[in-house]
Amino acid sequence: MTDEDKNEMVVTPWEVRGKVDYKRLIREFGTQPLTDELIKRIAKHTGKLHLQLQRKLFFSHRDMDVILDLYEKGIKFVLYTGRGPSGPVHIGHLVPWIFTKHLQEKFKTKLYFQMTDDEKFLVEDELKLKDTINFGYENALDLIALGFKPEDTFIIFDVQDIDLLYDIALEVAKRITFSTAKATFGFQESTNIGWIFWPAIQAVPCFIHAKLTGENVPALIPAAIDQDPYWRVTRDIAQKLGYYKPAQIHCRFLPGLGIGGKMSASEPETSIFIIDPPNVVKRKIWNAFTGGKATAAEQRKTGADPSICTVFHYFLYLFEEDDKKLKEREKQCKAGGILCGECKADLTERINKFLTEHRKKREKARNIVEKFRIKR
Ligand code: TRP
């Protein structure tokens, strides 16, 4: 692969690579930008804006305005998000889950969370079904550790819960042609047929609330924008099945620690996993790509560039809620008043504190996973 190919943007549900141009994604996927006006409308219901909205980590949507119109008329929505359990969760995965929890609390809605152990088995050559099922269980602990409650949060483990999904999946699958699926997902002659059918399963939780309760309400999906192709095909067939089109609110990818903010599970040094012990977190952050200069003397003189700094992005999106403190850090960085070592040490401390707490909560969650299953 040439350097140019490596930088070329590729965003699909199974692969994100190159420099991500979010404006271009909005254009190419045909989604809407999340405007200040719409953000203000959300704030009318939520009060103070969530940090991830205020700092534009969520940046795009489909029908968020329709969801609010309906809500204001008294028609509630349900939330739906999910996870492909191909390994341990890293901090980037928590971003949309944290935001989902905020929406759930403010709008008092139910959440359906799909754990796609089937998808990851079909898609990842090297994973066995028992591996993805096991990761599904382990990843559910991370979700529960964020404080979701079993009264209004339902985790769907695809393999175990297929009896609840199969009838709707068939209705969906019958209405999507191979040619649409191929054009949307880039399927090839060599793609296994399980994978080709699979998008029908990801569509199901958009409609499952209606089936379980008889209450036909729309779903709102907070997720990273790479999942959008699924929603395009789902939206096309929703009304034919008598349901609302699912709405989405899309987030960016949390930048990783590599050059240009890359984070990928296949490059473990660029992401911080929930299970990383403190010394590993420290090492990864110590090696992170920053906007710093070659020498301390030079940096003191000319300052550094937070806009390209991965450490700064972690403060921005997750670990510095205080706007004033964030601004001060940015200012000091640009002026050469603080050096990268100091920011790295601060971030290491914050992340390790968060992870220590999180791991305690996730161990406690082991006893209550069953409570989050949908009752038969
Ligand atoms: N396909 C997603 C993944 O690989 C998992 C998923 C299923 C999901 N349903 C979802 C993600 C809804 C976001 C929203 O991670």
Image (cartoon, helix red, strand yellow):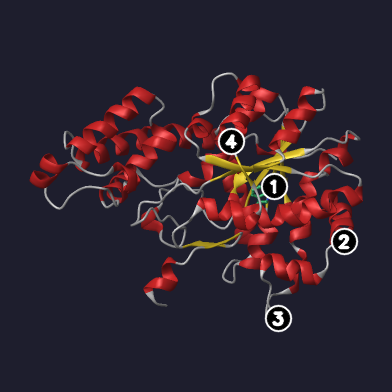
Instruction: Kindly identify the amino acid type of the residue bearing the numbered disc 2.
Output: Arg
Q: Please identify the quarter of the rendering in which residue 278 is found.
A: top left
Check disc 4 and report the residue beneath it: 35
Q: Which residue is mark 2?
A: 175
SS label for mark 2: loop
Q: Is residue 159 visible?
A: no
Q: CA distance from mark 3 to mark 1?
A: 28 Å
Marks 1 and 4 sit apart, C-alpha to C-alpha, by: 29 Å
Residue 124 in picture, x, y percent from top left:
59, 67
* SS state under label 3: loop
What's the CA distance linking mark 4 and mark 2? Answer: 33 Å
Label 1: few (<14), some (14–19) or many (≥20) C-alpha neighbours in 10 Å: many
Which residue reaches farthest left? 297
- Label 3 – label 2 distance at C-alpha: 21 Å
Quarter in which the N terminus is drawn: bottom left
Callout 3, which amino acid?
A: Glu
* 259 versus 152 height, above or below: below
Element assignment for label 4: loop
Say whether disc 3 or disc 2 marks the residue closer to the N-terminus.
2
**Foreground: 255 or 356?**
255
Residue 234 percent coordinates (x, y): 78, 53
Residue at the spot of label 3:
189
Kindly identify the residue that appears in the image at 57 percent across and 55 percent down. Answer: 25
> Could you tell me which secondary element the residue under label 1 belongs to?
strand
Q: Amino acid at mark 1?
A: Gln
Q: Mark 1 — residue?
A: 114
Q: Residues within 10 Å of mark 4 (few under 14, many from 20)?
A: few
Ligand 1 neighbours mark 1 (CB distance < 8 Å): yes
Q: Earlier in the sequence, mark 1 or mark 4?
A: 4
Q: Earlier in the sequence, mark 3 or mark 1?
A: 1
